[in-house]
């Protein structure tokens, strides 16, 4: 689930006036910070009253961390479920207690020659559907406690293997002063994949053991690290420049078909009512569509017939289509829509085409 934070106390002597902020900030998470620490810093800089991240990155990891503000938190589960791409360096010859460079070395073995043939074999072996046992140092819960809580006490508990998919795996020799040999991997994978465990499993298959020396998330759900802003850059910006870094809420559903409603249907849809259409009016049956309706020119909620509608539709939320019926899913409130239109009409009304992700 998305981790939503409450108001954070401002530094002593400085009072922060929180405000509604809506959108997605693509943060390049720095090394050493937890995802929640990074979220709190960005939330403070934007003076946002509601925010959540879309799944944790280890403190060791850097890269794409989508942060959801305001109405965007309603759609963050889509990022939790999204496919992801990582780049990592495996340090061969040593296993650690945490499967990464932060843990204690628990085993050392000689490293065989790392040939291109060996890497090709490992690539074939670890591409496709896999069963993966989650690491003890993870936030998964067992009997109400996170696994890492057991691990810190030296306890190991039984974990069920999870089914994951490695869609694409690229492996090349690398050099690293911390190990006699290293491998750089680029992994495109399904949700729930632990790259630390993948690295350990590759090390075992080679016969020498391995742990992660570094980890970077390059892409998640269509967002890439090329779109990200760093915390130092964000700190150096004015508040207006920080707001300009936000992507629209609907960028979270950019990959789905869109439906645009007239004023009457938009008002009823926002109240949670299903809308029956003529055959094909909402398109084919779909588990998810993004829904738009007319917005007024005065920064109000979507028009219900009173007031002129602009030629740019306002994002209303998500729905699914079954048998020519548009069934509401996650909806924005009229207040959220109004806040977005007042703050930035382009954020409220830009159609969420893939091109809208670039900035």
Image (cartoon, rainbow, N blue to C red):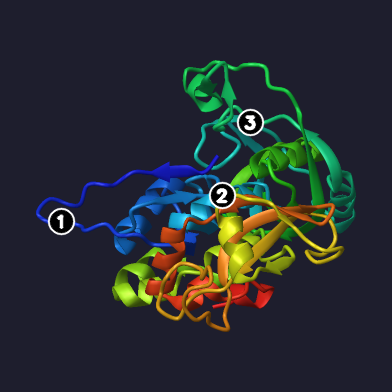
- At x 29%, y 46%, the residue is 7
Q: Nearer the viewer, mark 2 or mark 1?
A: 1
Identify the secondary structure beneath mark 3.
loop
- At x 52%, y 27%, the residue is 148
Identify the secondary structure beneath mark 1.
loop
Spot occupied by residue 276 in the image (x, y as percentages of width and height): 75, 56
First-in-chain label (3 vs 2): 3
- At x 83%, y 45%, the residue is 126
Identify the secondary structure beneath mark 2.
loop
The tag on residue 299 is: none
Q: Nearer the viewer, mark 1 or mark 3?
A: 1
Spot occupied by residue 124 in the image (x, y as percentages of width and height): 90, 49
Q: Nearer the viewer, residue 14 or 59?
A: 14
- What quarter of the picture does the C terminus occupy? bottom right
Left or right of 45 on screen, residue 312? right
Query: How packed is label 2: few (under 14 Cα within 10 Å), some, or many (20 or more)?
Result: few
Q: Nearer the viewer, residue 207 or 341?
A: 341
- Placement of 157 over or under 131, stated as above or below: above
Q: Is residue 324 visible?
A: yes
Spot occupied by residue 62 in the image (x, y as percentages of width and height): 52, 56
Q: Nearer the viewer, mark 3 or mark 2?
A: 3
Left or right of 243 on screen, residue 155? right
Residue at label 1? 15
- Placement of 25 over or under 91, stated as above or below: below
Q: Real-space Cα distance between discs 2 and 1?
A: 46 Å
Residue at label 2? 178
Residue at label 3? 135
């Amino acid at each position: 689930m998305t981790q939503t934070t409450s108001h954070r106390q401002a530094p002593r002597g400085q009072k922060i006036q929180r405000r509604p902020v809506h959108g997605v900030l693509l943060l390049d998470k720095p090394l050493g910070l937890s995802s929640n620490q990074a979220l709190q810093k960005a939330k403070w800089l934007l003076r946002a009253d509601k925010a959540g991240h879309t799944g944790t990155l280890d403190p060791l990891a850097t890269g794409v961390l989508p942060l959801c503000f305001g109405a965007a938190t309603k759609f963050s589960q889509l990022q939790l479920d999204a496919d992801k791409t990582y780049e990592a360096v495996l340090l061969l010859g040593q296993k650690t207690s945490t499967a990464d460079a932060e843990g204690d070395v628990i085993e050392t073995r000689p490293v065989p020659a790392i040939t291109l043939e060996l890497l090709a074999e490992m690539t074939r072996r670890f591409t496709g559907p896999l069963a993966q046992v989650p690491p003890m140092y993870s936030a998964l819960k067992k009997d109400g406690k996170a696994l890492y809580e057991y691990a810190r006490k030296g306890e190991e508990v039984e974990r069920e293997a999870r089914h994951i998919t490695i869609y694409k795996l690229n492996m090349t020799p690398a050099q690293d002063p911390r190990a006699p040999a290293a491998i750089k991997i680029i992994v495109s994978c399904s949700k729930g994949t632990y790259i630390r465990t993948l690295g350990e499993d590759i090390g075992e298959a080679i016969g020498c053991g391995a742990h992660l020396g570094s980890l970077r998330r390059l892409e998640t759900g269509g967002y890439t690290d090329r779109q990200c802003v760093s915390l130092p850059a964000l700190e150096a910006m004015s508040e207006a420049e920080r707001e300009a870094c936000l992507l629209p809420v609907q960028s979270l559903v950019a990959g789905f078909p869109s439906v645009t409603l007239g004023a009457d249907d938009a008002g009823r849809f926002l109240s949670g009512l299903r809308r029956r259409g003529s055959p094909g009016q909402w398109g084919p049956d779909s588990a998810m569509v993004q829904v738009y309706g007319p917005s007024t020119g005065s920064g109000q909620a979507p028009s219900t017939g009173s007031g002129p509608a602009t030629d740019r539709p306002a994002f209303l939320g998500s729905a699914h289509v079954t048998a020519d019926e548009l069934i509401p899913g996650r909806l924005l409130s009229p207040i959220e829509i109004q806040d977005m239109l007042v703050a930035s009409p382009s954020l409220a009304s830009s159609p969420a085409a893939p091109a809208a992700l670039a900035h």
